[in-house]
Image: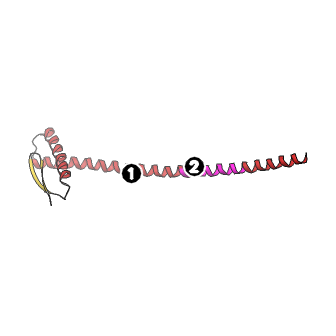
Amino acid sequence: MPQVTVTIGGRDYKMACGDGEEEHLLALGRLVDERHGELKRSFGEVGDVRLSVMTAIMIADELNEAKRRHAALEQEIERLRDSQADAASATDGRHAETAGRIAAAAERLERLADELTDGARRD
C-alpha cells in the first residue's frame, strides 16, 4: 500500500492510500493546507487543534452546501425530464390530431373528386 506525506500547517503527516491514489491524496492535503492557512491568517495563532477543527468545519460546510446544491440540481433535472415527457406527449397528441384532420380532409377531397368525375360523365 503506497504512502504519501501530506503537509498541513507546516506539519508532515504520513498517510497510506490505495494504488494510484497518491496524487489525489496529495491534492486533498494541499486543499486542507490552503484552508488551514487562510484561517491562520484570519485568526492568528489560536492553537493547532482549534485551527484544525475550524478547518474541518469550513470544509464540511462547503461539502454540505455542495450536497444541497447537488440535490437541488437533481430535483431540477427531474422536473425538466417530467416537463420534457409532458411536452413530448402533448406533441404526439397534436401530431395524431393533425394526422386525423389530414385524413378527414383527404377523404372529403376524394368524395369531391368522385362527385366531380360523376358530374363530368353525365355531361
Q: Residue at x 13, y 48 (%)?
A: 50
Q: Which range of residues does the magenta coloring cover? A: 88-104
* Residue 118 horizontal side relative to residue 33, left or right: right
Residue 69 at what x, y percent from top left?
34, 47
10 Å crowding of disc 2: few (<14), some (14-19), many (20+) = few
Residue that mark 1 sits on: 74
Q: Amino acid at mark 1?
A: Glu
Task: Please tell me whether the stretch drawn in magenta is mainly helix, strand or loop.
Answer: helix
Front residue of 17 and 42: 17
Question: Residue at the right extreme?
Answer: 123
Who is closer to the viewer here, 114 or 100? 114
Report, in whole angstroms, how far the alpha carbon at label 1 lies from the one at label 2: 25 Å
**Of 23 and 85, the residue lying toward us:** 23
Q: Is residue 93 magenta?
A: yes
Find disc 2 in the rendering and name its residue: 91
Instruction: Please state which of the two labelled residues, at mark 1 or mark 2, is closer to the viewer.
Output: 2
- Find numbered disc 2 in the image and state the secondary structure of the residue it sits on: helix
Q: Nearer the viewer, residue 97 or 9?
A: 97
Mark 2 is on which residue type? Thr
Residue 48's spot in the image, x, y percent? 10, 47
Quadrant that contains the C terminus: top right
Mark 1, Cα crowd under 10 Å, few <14 / some 14-19 / many 20+, is few
Residue for point 68% across, 48% down: 102
Relative to 26, 78 lies left or right: right
**Residue at position x 14%, y 42% from top?**
37
Is residue 105 one of those drawn in magenta?
no
Query: Residue 64, percent across and down?
Result: 28, 50
